[in-house]
Image (cartoon, helix red, strand yellow):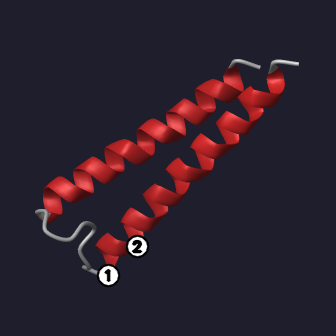
Amino acid sequence: MESGPAIFAGAAFTLFGAALLLWTTVRLRHREPVVYGVGPGAAATLTTFSGTLFLLLGVWCFGRL
């Protein structure tokens, strides 16, 4: 019974983290700003860190099953 919320949370975190990493990669390759009004290095670092964190959190949720 407790595996339902873990599956949902794992899927949500994993999809969001993967999408954030993909979006950041595409924006950087096209030399477009990742976040408006923020330096490109800081924005790329923050979004990459956040995407990786969400991806790892999703994998951790799946590991708790």
- Residue toward you, 16 or 1: 1
Element at label 1: loop
* The C terminus, quarter of image: top right
Residue 14 against residue 40 in the figure, above or below = above
Q: Amino acid at mark 1?
A: His
Q: Is 49 left or right of 23, judged from the image as shown?
A: left
Marks 2 & 1, CB-CB < 8 Å contact? yes
Q: Amino acid at mark 2?
A: Val
Q: Is 50 left or right of 56, judged from the image as shown?
A: left
Give the image quarter of residue 8. top right
Give the image quarter of residue 11. top right
User: Label 2, label 1: how many angstroms apart (C-alpha)?
Assistant: 6 Å
- Residue toward you, 50 or 30: 50
Which residue is disc 2 drawn over?
26
Residue 30 is tagged as 1
Residue 2 against residue 43 in the figure, above or below = above
Q: Is 59 left or right of 39, judged from the image as shown?
A: right
